[in-house]
Image (cartoon, rainbow, N blue to C red):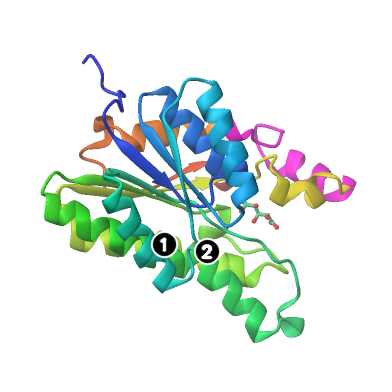
Amino acid sequence: MPGLFDLTGSTALITGSSRGLGFAFGEALAAHGATIVLNGTSAERLDSAVKSLHAKGYAAEKTLFDVSDQTAVVEAFKTLDAKGLIIDILINNAGIQLRKPLVDLELSEWQRVIDTNLTSAFLVGKEAAKRMIARKQGGKIINIGSLMSECARATVAPYTTAKGGIKMLTRAMTAEWAQHNIQVNAIGPGYMATDMNAALISNPQFDSWVKGRTPSGRWGLPDELAGTAVYLASRASNYVNGQIIYVDGGMLAVL
Ligand code: GCO
């Protein structure tokens, strides 16, 4: 079928996309014709990221807001409406990591991770879905999970809890929004070579563990998530709903 993965004419909002996996998702969808709306909280990083996409001939806009702040989210969508930017594809990618034993964790630290990694997907997803439902043209929502959507690791409890919630929020969104031709799915990246994991990559013991524990024997590269993102953003996945696709080199499949 021609154009099965063609995103021309669609507009994708990607949260937390001025760098890392979020920016990689933006490049992937832009390469398949989508207009990209990058999001972040640093004007400088956002401007640089938009310029980078423009330099490749891609259509890109920016929207500066904190995804965990409901007022900011609501206002941001009103601004996108006013600009005529109709969001057909949402990737809830924004996330932070905080590595600390549970017994030492402050409530404020716990809350910050949960709000940024999980509550944000509810806040942004709700605003996007309200508009998709009203437009009656369907849409795509892709939540970014993790290996921690399935398995825990010591010292990353709030991140693990949030990512487990992302898996179930994906199913909860499906339960309510699939009837409106909105496909809601998730991507579960494995250990990817990103800035967030720099401390792990540079730790010889952890690096060795990842390479030994992953059947592919290596860290993943951000652009290795591109195919799954384009697939879930395109009409190729119009009958796929509530799923989480792990791109993890086989780590979850093998003891
Ligand atoms: C960690 C890492 C992981 C990965 C990724 C795995 O501290 O174990 O940050 O959480 O980043 O989420 O899927």
Residue occupied by mark 1: 121
Q: Is residue 65 above or below residue 132?
A: below
Query: Is 116 left, or right, of 137 in this rendering?
Result: right
Q: Is residue 104 above or below residue 200?
A: below
Where disc 2 sits, the SS reads helix
Q: At 70% across and 66% down in the image, what residue appears? A: 98
Our reading of the magenta stretch's main secondary structure is helix
Query: Is 98 left, or right, of 16 in this rendering?
Result: right
Query: Is 217 left, or right, of 46 in this rendering?
Result: right
Q: Quadrant of the N terminus?
A: top left
Q: Position of residue 131 (x, y in %)?
A: 21, 56
Q: Are marks 1 and 2 in contact (CB under 8 Å)?
A: yes
Q: Quadrant of residue 119?
A: bottom left
| Residue 18 in view (yes/no) | yes
| Residue 255 in view (yes/no) | no
What amino acid is at disc 1?
Ala
Q: Is residue 116 above or below residue 221?
A: below
Start-end of magenta stretch: 204-223
Query: Residue 94 in magenta?
Result: no
Badge number at residue 141 = none
- Are there few (<14), some (14-19), or many (20+) residues within 10 Å of tag 1? many
Q: At 34% across and 56% down in the image, what residue appears? A: 79
Count every numbered label the image shows and give the total.
Answer: 2
Q: Position of residue 186 (x, y in %)?
A: 40, 49
Residue occupied by mark 2: 117
Where disc 1 sits, the SS reads helix
Q: Position of residue 254 (x, y in %)?
A: 59, 44
Q: Is residue 166 above or below residue 59?
A: below
What amino acid is at disc 2?
Asn
Q: At 59% across and 70% down in the image, what residue appears? A: 113
* Spatial separation of the CA atoms under disc 1 and disc 2: 7 Å
